[in-house]
Image (tube, helix red, strand yellow):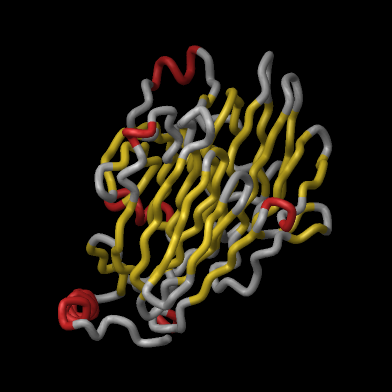
């Protein structure tokens, strides 16, 4: 029996402002987060105009989450209150576990043409790890393996494809984070853990993501239903949240598709969220902001 995942819901990323005035597109976040457990937010900060991104994300706190930043164009200079400094560039990834608390900044810089591009994904931490020590995994492009799986070329940030594992491991939610490039006129079937939340975000071209289920048609947010089914192709900036199943099927027509495929084990815990801090209760949130104001936010050096 075919256990391929149907499409549960389709989203179109929407323009928003963050940081000190960075223009980006949000694929999901906040009110939609319960659908994506254990993930909280996905931002797409690709842009061609320095005025849209140079203001960056000056000093701000995080607690209770992990932030995963993946760069396609330009670079991001980062620093934090613990003395860590660095720059991530094209193809690099920063996987930051905020844990008990960190104060940091992220300042984007475009390439020689003024082009900047990348994505930031927020993953929730379980209650038992909310107050763990902060840590970084800074991964350079050459550390991220690329495998050829049928017609597809797949960069593995975390997870495993055909016996090759990505460099990020030992994460409670057992995440998979893949950058998949599928050429025109081809098809990919990729196994997924049945109990995991799985979504795809299209970053170039277009593709057909699974068959629709006539008995449980998908919902749409920011996407025109009739356009989608007159030509059922998910295009750049479209996010597909999959229903339960054991695999996904993706196919292409006269152009290829490049997409991020992300999955993780749901936590099933209450979420109390305000700005850059995500805890389990309002009381924990109040304590975090009180500590930030009092200068006692940082728990581990």
Task: Identify the image quadrant of residue 165.
Answer: bottom right
Q: Is 114 drawn above or below residue 107 in the view shown?
A: above
Residue furthest toward the front?
A: 112
Q: Is residue 168 visible?
A: yes
Q: Residue at x 37, y 45 (%)?
A: 28
In this rendering, would 133 be left or right of 210? left
Q: Residue 39's spot in the image, x, y percent?
A: 44, 58
Task: Tell me what residue is drawn at x 36 percent, y 37 percent.
Answer: 25
Query: Where's residue 40, x and y in %?
Result: 39, 57
Residue occupying image coordinates x 44% and y 83%: 132
**Quadrant location of the N terminus?**
top right
* Occupied quadrant, residue 128: bottom left
Q: Is residue 115 above or below residue 5?
A: above
User: How many marks are shown on the rendered structure?
Assistant: 0
| Frontmost residue, 92 versus 166 | 92
Q: Does any portion of residue 215 appear in the rendered image?
A: no
Residue 241 in percent (x, y) is at: 48, 43
Q: Quadrant of the C terminus?
A: bottom left
Name above or below for residue 107 compared with residue 2.
Answer: below
242 or 98: which is nearer to us?
98
Give me the residue at 68% from left, 51% from top.
141
Q: Residue 128 or 276: which is nearer the viewer?
A: 276
- In the rendered structure, the answer to whether residue 236 lies left or right of residue 27 reads right
Q: Position of residue 72 (x, y in %)?
A: 57, 40
Residue 275, above or below 101:
above
């Amino acid at each position: 029996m075919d256990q391929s995942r149907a499409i549960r819901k389709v989203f179109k990323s929407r323009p928003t402002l963050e940081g000190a005035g960075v223009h980006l597109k949000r694929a999901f976040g906040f009110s939609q987060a319960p659908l994506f457990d254990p993930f909280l937010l996905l931002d797409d900060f690709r842009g061609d105009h320095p005025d849209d991104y140079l203001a960056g994300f000056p000093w701000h706190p995080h607690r209770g989450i992990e932030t995963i930043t993946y760069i396609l164009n330009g670079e991001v200079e980062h620093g934090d209150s613990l003395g860590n400094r660095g720059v991530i560039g094209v193809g690099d990834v920063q996987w930051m576990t905020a844990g008990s608390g960190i104060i940091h900044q992220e300042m984007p810089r475009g390439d020689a043409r003024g082009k900047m591009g990348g994505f930031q994904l927020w993953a929730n931490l379980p209650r038992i790890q909310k107050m763990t020590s902060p840590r970084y995994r800074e991964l350079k492009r050459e550390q991220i393996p690329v495998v050829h799986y049928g017609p597809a070329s797949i960069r593995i940030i975390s997870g495993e494809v055909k016996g090759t594992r990505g460099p990020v491991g030992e994460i409670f939610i057992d995440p998979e984070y893949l950058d998949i490039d599928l050429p025109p006129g081809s098809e990919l079937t990729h196994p997924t853990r049945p109990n995991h939340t799985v979504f795809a975000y299209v970053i170039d071209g277009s593709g057909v993501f699974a068959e629709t289920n006539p008995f449980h048609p998908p919902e749409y947010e920011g996407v025109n239903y009739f356009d989608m089914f007159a030509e059922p192709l998910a295009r750049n900036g479209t996010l597909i949240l999959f229903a339960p199943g054991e695999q996904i099927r993706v196919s292409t027509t006269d152009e290829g598709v490049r997409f991020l495929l992300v999955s993780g084990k749901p936590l099933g815990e209450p979420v109390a969220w305000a700005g850059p801090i995500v805890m389990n209760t309002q009381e924990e949130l109040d304590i975090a902001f009180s500590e930030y104001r009092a200068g006692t936010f940082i728990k581990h050096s």
